[in-house]
Amino acid sequence: MIPRPDASEHLPYYAKYIDRVPDGDLLQTLRTQLDDTLSLVRGLDESRGGHRYAPGKWTIREVLAHVIDAERIFAYRALRIARGDATPLSSFDENAYAENAGAESRTLADLADELQHVRLGNLAMFRALSDDAFARTGTASGGPVSARALAWIIAGHELHHVALLRERYLADAPATAAAV
């Protein structure tokens, strides 16, 4: 069981993600939410992938690529911190990443497959970490963060973006796609 991090283990900005995650077994939550997200994405018609809910906003494909990129970055930070690496880790510009991700040349199915592989790899890593490793803290984006907090941030970040997909991108979709 990976305990919920306290506020001293992350920058205040990340509380909005951690607070979204239900209490309980975080590894099970990460697995269940993966299944839910894959069901949602794989239930969409490919023609929806380029949909933006407003001008200048990311497409559904770009949102998925962002979730994948962010999970990789958060997991990399968690690994380095869990291993005792004290090197401060920089932030990343999510918009620059989105612009350079090439998401619009990919299919929803391909992005869903990549998300699945990234998450399953991260679940394997998290299962192998000790309580001491999860409790280790380091510096990322100019502030303190624990390996444990990063695991919870991954879960909350995905929940945040899936909620946006449902509320802003798929609200006008047929009931079967929006209700998944």
Image (cartoon, rainbow, N blue to C red):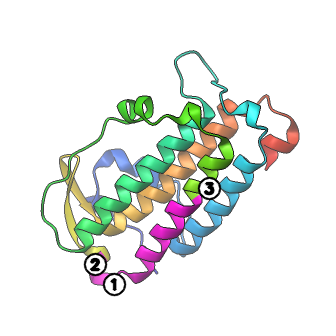
Circle number at residue 133 = 2
Q: Secondary structure at mark 1?
A: loop
Decide whether the magenta segment is chiefly helix, strand or loop.
helix
The outermost residue toward the top is 55
Q: Amino acid at mark 1?
A: Ser
- Measuring from the top left, give residue 21's x and y in whole percent: 53, 59
Q: Which numbered marker is on residue 113?
A: 3
Q: CA distance from mark 3 to mark 1?
A: 28 Å
Q: Would you say residue 119 sits in the magenta stretch?
A: yes
Q: Between 39 and 130, which is closer to the camera in this rendering?
A: 39
Q: Amino acid at mark 3?
A: Asp
Assess disc 1: are there few (<14), some (14-19) or many (≥20) residues with their C-alpha within 10 Å of its C-alpha: few
The mark nearer the N terminus, 3 or 2, is 3
Callout 3: helix, strand or loop?
Answer: helix
Task: Give SS at disc 2.
Answer: helix
Q: Is residue 35 left or right of residue 87?
A: right
Is residue 2 something that shows in the picture? no
Residue 139, placed above or below residue 134: above
Which residue is located at x 48 percent, y 41 percent?
66
Q: Which residue is at the front of the view, 177 or 2?
A: 177
Using the image, determine if residue 3 lies above or below residue 151.
below
CA separation in Å, label 3 and label 2: 29 Å
Do tag 2 and tag 1 residues touch (Cβ < 8 Å)?
yes
Residue at the (50%, 59%) spot, across then down:
155
What span is colored magenta in the figure? 116-133
Measured from the top left, where is residue 89 in percent x and y? Answer: 20, 52
Please tell me the numbered disc located at residue 130.
1
Q: Which residue lies at the image location 29% right of the left edge and 60% below the top edge?
A: 77
Crowd tier of the residue under label 3, counting other residues whose Cα lies within 10 Å: few below 14, some 14–19, many 20 or above = some
